[in-house]
Each structure stands twice: as structure tokens, then as C-alpha cells.
Image: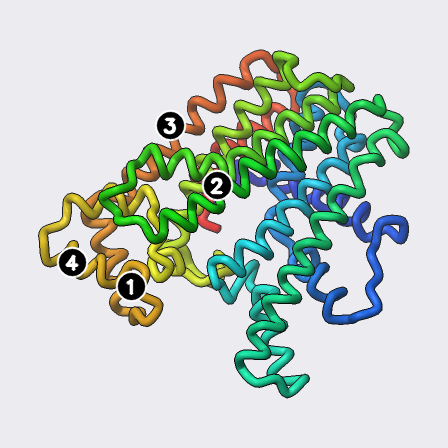
């Protein structure tokens, strides 16, 4: 990664530490009588991710002139909320690896088999059960933190109420609708799905939560409970468009990245038959034999590693990856225009660097 991103990474790491200290404080920790549930709820949180969403929220707060420390409860809320969606998403996608560690449901299925003597079917069901319960608990934990904006940082009492309603009603409805569309698209013939369909799904699954981060951070920084304020809207547009670009880049990395760096199985999207921008662009340009082969591998859970690599080669050959990269760059360039009203500051510089990082990152 280029040294130009070092200030951004340092700023993100600092805010990640602030959020973790808040979450792991005695006041906010959760304690369960059942150790497996305790381990599951904390699994991804302790494994550590990139913490981009909390950082973007705090940067947005500072960029509009606020004290970004006052945004910590909202940043922690977003981190836990995102974590809950990952735990459940891994169940839906049947993934076995996340952030370099076993996914929650896979981990506890293995524990049930090895430690508790469950047969494979019982162990699988146990793992799914713990994953669902852990995600449910993370969502509830996330919701419990927003009132600290008022009780700890003395922000207007309407603010946590407005943000809570926005996140747990509007954003959640959109995000889960996007996840549902993603599942349905995986069983829809490729020629029945358009690029616009996929981009809309990506915005719903990823862009909308980033948009919330931009709006929430700006609202906290301005101490303004009305989300239609021009600066709040601008920050939301910036973050949402960057979020969509982030997901496009994620799809690229999902088939090109180093697995050790990525922290999850490379090629999983091919095995799952995900209808990505990459595949939609490349398939129509393949000859009949290549297309037939690619379609036989996409969505095939028994596909060999060699077959997956061959499909990746076809996607590169026919410009699918280059096309997706160009789309991501376009989203980022459009997003940057929304930062124009902001005064120069370290926070604005970090946001601009983050936008560049989205399409330059390799993990």
C-alpha cells in the first residue's frame, strides 16, 4: 500500500482504538452465563476489521467542525451493527472464513462436533443457531449505545432518537431488502439481470450504511437533529457513493486478492454464483464454449480450484475486472464533488484519502 495512505491508516487506527476502548469498558461490556454465546458475540469484534465505517462517521463529524470524540457512541453502534450483518451474511453465504478466522457459525459447528460429540447434522444446526443468536445480540447491543450521545456527551436528546429511527427502520429495511435481492439474484439467469440491477443491490447492501455514517457523523458534529441539512445531505452522498465503490472493489478483490491478506476465501463469489458487475460484463463477450464452461463453474460448490482459476482468467480476458474498476473510480470521483462545501481540515483530507484508498486497496 502506498505511503500516501499512512496518515489515513494512522487516523483510522486511532479511532478504532477509541471505539474499542468504549465498547470494552466495564460500563458497556456484555456478560453471558453461556461461554459459547459470549465468545460468539465478541468473535468478529475482537478479531478486528478495518473499522472504516466508524472512522468515516467520526471523520464526518470532525469535517463539519464537531468534536469527533462525541461521535464515539454512534461509531460503536455502527461497528456493532455492521458486525451483526456480517455474522448473518456469512450464514446466508455459507462462508467459512472471515477476517482470517472461522466464521461464527462454522466455528461453533466445529466446536459442537469436537467438544460436544454432536453428529454432523446436529453440529451444523448448533453452529447456525449460535450465529443467529450472536447476530441478534449484537444488533441489540448496537441499539443500546446511541443514548450515550445525550447521557454522556450532552448532545440534544432528539439526536439519538432521530439516528436510532433512521438506522433501525429506514437503513435496516433498505439493507435487508438488498440482501434479499442478492440472494434472489444468485438464482436468476445472468441474462435476466442488468448492471443497473446489481448496482442498486450494492447500494442497498453497502452504500446505504455508509451513507448513514456520513449523515450521522455530520449531524453529531453540527448538533443538528434534522437530517435534511445541506451539509448532512452532502456528507451522506459522499459516503454512500464511496460505499458503493467499496463494494465493487470488494467484488474485484474477491477473485483477485491474496487470500491471506483478504482474510477470507478467494473465489467464494464464483462458487456461490454471485451476479457481479465483473461477470455480467464478461459473459456476453465469451465464445460459446467459454461461456458454457464459465456457467458450469459459477454456482458450483464442487468446482475445483483449477476451474475457478480458469474462470477468473476469462473474467480478466474479457475486461470484466477492468470494467468494474472503471465503475468504482467513477463513483469515487462523483463522491468527491460532495466534499466541496467543507472547509479544509485534516478530517477533509482523511475523507479524500479514504476515497482514493477504496479503489487502491488490496485487502
Structural distance between the alpha carbons of marks 3 and 2:
22 Å
Residue at image position (57%, 18%) is 234
Give the x, y percent position of residue 105.
59, 67
Structural distance between the alpha carbons of marks 1 and 3:
29 Å
Q: Earlier in the sequence, mark 4 or mark 3?
A: 4
Give the x, y percent position of residue 183.
42, 50
265 to the left or right of 139: left
Pointer 4 local density, CA inside 10 Å: few below 14, some 14–19, many at least 20: few
44 to the left or right of 188: right
The disc placed on residue 308 is 1
Structural distance between the alpha carbons of marks 4 and 3:
32 Å
Q: Nearer the viewer, residue 243 or 356?
A: 243
Residue depth check, mark 4 versus mark 1: number of the one nearer the observer: 4
Pointer 2 local density, CA inside 10 Å: few below 14, some 14–19, many at least 20: many
Q: Which residue is mark 3?
A: 330
Q: Earlier in the sequence, mark 4 or mark 2?
A: 2
Q: Which residue is mark 2?
A: 178
Structural distance between the alpha carbons of marks 4 and 1:
14 Å
Residue depth check, mark 1 versus mark 3: number of the one nearer the observer: 1
Q: Which residue is mark 4?
A: 292
Q: Earlier in the sequence, mark 2 or mark 1?
A: 2
Amino acid at each position: 500500500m502506498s505511503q500516501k495512505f499512512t496518515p489515513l491508516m494512522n487516523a483510522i487506527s486511532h479511532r478504532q482504538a477509541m471505539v474499542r476502548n468504549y465498547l470494552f469498558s466495564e460500563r458497556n461490556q456484555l456478560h453471558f452465563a453461556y461461554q459459547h454465546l459470549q465468545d460468539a458475540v465478541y468473535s468478529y469484534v475482537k478479531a478486528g476489521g478495518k473499522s472504516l465505517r466508524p472512522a468515516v462517521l467520526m471523520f464526518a463529524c470532525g469535517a463539519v467542525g464537531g468534536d469527533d470524540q462525541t461521535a464515539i457512541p454512534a461509531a460503536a453502534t455502527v461497528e456493532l451493527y455492521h458486525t451483526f450483518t456480517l455474522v448473518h451474511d456469512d450464514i446466508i453465504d455459507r462462508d467459512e472464513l472471515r477476517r482470517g478466522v472461522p466464521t461464527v457459525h462454522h466455528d461453533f459447528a466445529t466446536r459442537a462436533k469436537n467438544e460436544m460429540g454432536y453428529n454432523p447434522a446436529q453440529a451444523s444446526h448448533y453452529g447456525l443457531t449460535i450465529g443467529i443468536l450472536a447476530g441478534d445480540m449484537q444488533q441489540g447491543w448496537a441499539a443500546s449505545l446511541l443514548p450515550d450521545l445525550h447521557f454522556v456527551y450532552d448532545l440534544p436528546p432528539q439526536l439519538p432518537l432521530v439516528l436510532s429511527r433512521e438506522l433501525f427502520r429506514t437503513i435496516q429495511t433498505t439493507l435487508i431488502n438488498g440482501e434479499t435481492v442478492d440472494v434472489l439474484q444468485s438464482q436468476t439467469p445472468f441474462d435476466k439481470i442488468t448492471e443497473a440491477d446489481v448496482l442498486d443491490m450494492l447500494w442497498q447492501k453497502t452504500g446505504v450504511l455508509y451513507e448513514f455514517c456520513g449523515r450521522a457523523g455530520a449531524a453529531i458534529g453540527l448538533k443538528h437533529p434534522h437530517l435534511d441539512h445541506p451539509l448532512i445531505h452532502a456528507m451522506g452522498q459522499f459516503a454512500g457513493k464511496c460505499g458503493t465503490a467499496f463494494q465493487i472493489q470488494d467484488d474485484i478483490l474477491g477473485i483477485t486478492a491474496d487470500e491471506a491478506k483478504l482474510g477470507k476465501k478467494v473465489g467464494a463469489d464464483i462458487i456461490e454464483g454471485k451476479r457481479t458487475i465483473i461477470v455480467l460484463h464478461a459473459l456476453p463477450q465469451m465464445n460459446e464454449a467459454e461461456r458454457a464452461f464459465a456457467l458450469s463453474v459459477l454456482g458450483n460448490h464442487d468446482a475445483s480450484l483449477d476451474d475457478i482459476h480458469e474462470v477468473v482468467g476469462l473474467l480478466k480476458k474479457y475486461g470484466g475486472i477492468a470494467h468494474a474498476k472503471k465503475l468504482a473510480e467513477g463513483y469515487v470521483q462523483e463522491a468527491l464533488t460532495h466534499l466541496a462545501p467543507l472547509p479544509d481540515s485534516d478530517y477533509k483530507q482523511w475523507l479524500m484519502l479514504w476515497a482514493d484508498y477504496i479503489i487502491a486497496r488490496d485487502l
